């Protein structure tokens, strides 16, 4: 890679308190690693009561051990979000535990097939990607949204991706699922507005993060697509929720490429190929 990411995407700050979330009841999917885990810790450190869903039992045990040491209210539940049945069962447990009140739902869980061309993807890989990255959002929202609407309070966060607003060669299943999650949440925002609900929504579209696939991504223009830290992304997510911001594209430089959609496809394609090597 050889290029130092933009300083705006770095932070030496450790996980710390965010007063706006004290006392809130939170559910986070994909909470055993990466942004999901850091988000769970930061919210718990702020005084929120957090339930994290995941499948890595060792990571869940370690998170709960740290929470106990630090006096955080953080509980982990095993949940495979590719299973509608498991989602509904865990959601029922959470609603019982929280006496029917969930203030913040963060749909963060995601998978990728690892950059295969559409003709090389197996049926199982396509199905898994759509189940986790898109259909799971339907099931969690349908489980937790009714109580939010009834109380006229709450917030739904959707972790989509820059791949949810810009297609990428070799990621057809991932892009399709993330585009879908984007569309689902945008539609939800308009549905809530139709009924005058105060329930908020935030779509987050991050670019490359310094973990997993992001570290190895072949990107031509790092000034437009800098490598972001997990801490930076988490801080931006929480700031967006606190402000009830509907859409967050990270980093902001991505908007220049996205704005090229206003021009003919041939122009848009040249811009994206030049900057992102897609």
Image (cartoon, helix red, strand yellow):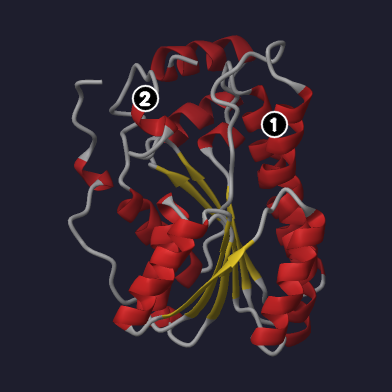
Viewed as shown, does residue 34 lie left or right of 226? right
Give the Cα separation between the discs numbered 2 and 1.
21 Å
- Secondary element type, mark 1: helix
Q: How many marks?
A: 2
Foreground disc of the pair 2, 1: 2
Q: Badge 1 is on which residue? A: 176
Secondary structure type for disc 2? helix
99 shown above or below 40: below
Q: Quadrant of residue 21?
A: bottom left
Residue on which the image places disc 2: 216
- Please state the horizontal and vertical placement of residue 6, each as a whole percent of the image: 23, 37
Confirm whether residue 21 shows in the render.
Answer: yes
Q: Residue at x 66, y 43 (%)?
A: 133
Residue 84: where, in percent of width, then height?
80, 55
Whole-percent x and y of residue 25? Answer: 56, 81
Residue 202 visible somewhere in the drawing: no
Classify residue 236 as left or right of residue 264: left
């Amino acid at each position: 890679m050889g290029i130092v990411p933009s300083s705006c995407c770095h932070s030496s700050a450790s996980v710390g308190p965010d007063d706006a979330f004290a006392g809130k009841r939170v559910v986070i999917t994909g909470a055993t690693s990466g942004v999901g885990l850091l988000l769970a810790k930061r919210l718990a450190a702020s005084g929120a009561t957090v339930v994290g869903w995941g499948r890595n039992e060792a990571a869940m045990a370690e998170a709960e051990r740290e929470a106990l040491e630090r006096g955080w209210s953080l509980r982990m539940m095993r949940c495979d979000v590719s299973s509608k049945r498991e989602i509904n069962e865990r959601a029922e447990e959470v609603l019982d535990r929280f006496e029917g009140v969930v203030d913040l739902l963060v749909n963060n869980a995601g998978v990728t097939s690892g950059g295969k061309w559409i003709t090389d993807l197996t049926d199982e890989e396509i199905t898994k990607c759509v189940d986790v990255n898109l259909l799971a959002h339907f099931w969690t929202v349908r489980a937790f949204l009714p109580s939010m609407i009834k109380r006229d309070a709450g917030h739904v966060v959707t972790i989509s991706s820059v791949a949810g607003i810009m297609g990428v060669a070799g990621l057809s299943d991932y892009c399709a699922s993330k585009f879908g999650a984007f569309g689902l949440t945008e539609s939800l925002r308009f549905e809530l507005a139709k009924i005058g609900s105060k329930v908020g929504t935030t779509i987050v579209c991050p670019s490359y993060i310094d973990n997993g696939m992001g570290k190895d991504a072949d990107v031509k223009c790092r000034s437009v697509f800098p490598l972001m830290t997990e801490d930076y992304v988490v801080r931006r997510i929480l700031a967006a929720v606190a402000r009830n911001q509907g859409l967050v594209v990270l980093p902001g430089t991505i908007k220049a490429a996205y704005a090229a959609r206003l021009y003919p496809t041939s122009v848009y394609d040249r811009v994206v190929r030049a900057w992102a090597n897609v």
